[in-house]
Image (cartoon, rainbow, N blue to C red):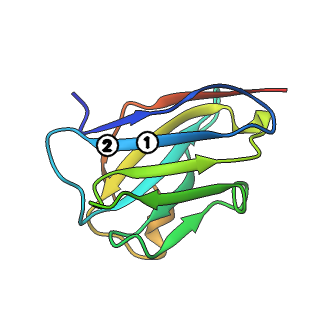
């Protein structure tokens, strides 16, 4: 089983909202930076958002800024992605990932992420 498990994906109309969750399976990631990436059909996987291990530092792709909010649960082991004002171009498989060592530069790249989930499908209809 993948070390991270995503949930909360589904089909929603444009302008709607979804909340994705990412929970660990078999280990703890409370001291890791956590990120969300997405991959649309025929496109490369891209960065969406990330949060530092403490939950205080957050990062967003320009395409989702002011619409998506990333947060960590109280135990810092679960990560959420609240997605509002969804657009058809947000349609993709969304992946959660964990990185033990990151910098403000690398946190928005796939390079430092050691652990990945299997993804959850988000489909936004127009």
Task: Please say if 104 is above or below 118.
Answer: below
Where does residue 124 sit, x and y in percent of width and height? Answer: 73, 29
Outermost residue, right direction?
Answer: 126
Question: Considering only vertical position in the picture, is 5 above or below 100?
Answer: above
Considering the numbered disc 2 on the image, is that residue within a helix, a strand or a loop?
Answer: strand
The residue carrying mark 2 is 23
Q: Residue furthest toward the left?
A: 26
Left or right of residue 116, residue 69 in this image: right
Quadrant where the C terminus is found in the figure? top right
Question: Quadrant location of residue 103?
Answer: bottom left
Q: Which residue is mark 1?
A: 21
**What is the distance, in whole Å, between disc 1 and disc 2 at their CAs?**
7 Å
Horizontal side, residue 36 vs residue 123: left or right? left
- Residue 60, by quadrant, is bottom right
- In contact (CB < 8 Å): disc 1 and disc 2: yes
List x then y, in percent, for residue 121: 55, 26
């Amino acid at each position: 089983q993948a070390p991270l498990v995503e949930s909360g994906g589904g089909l929603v109309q444009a302008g709607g909202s979804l909340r994705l969750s990412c929970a660990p399976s078999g280990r703890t990631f409370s001291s890791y930076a956590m990120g969300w990436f997405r991959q649309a059909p025929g496109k490369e996987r891209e960065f969406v958002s990330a949060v530092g291990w403490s939950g205080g530092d957050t990062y967003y792709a320009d395409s989702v800024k002011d619409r998506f909010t990333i947060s960590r649960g109280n135990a810092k082991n679960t990560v959420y992605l609240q997605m509002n004002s969804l657009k058809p171009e947000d349609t993709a498989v969304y992946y959660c990932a964990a990185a033990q060592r990151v910098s403000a530069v690398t946190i928005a790249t796939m390079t430092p992420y050691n652990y990945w989930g299997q993804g959850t499908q988000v489909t936004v209809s127009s």
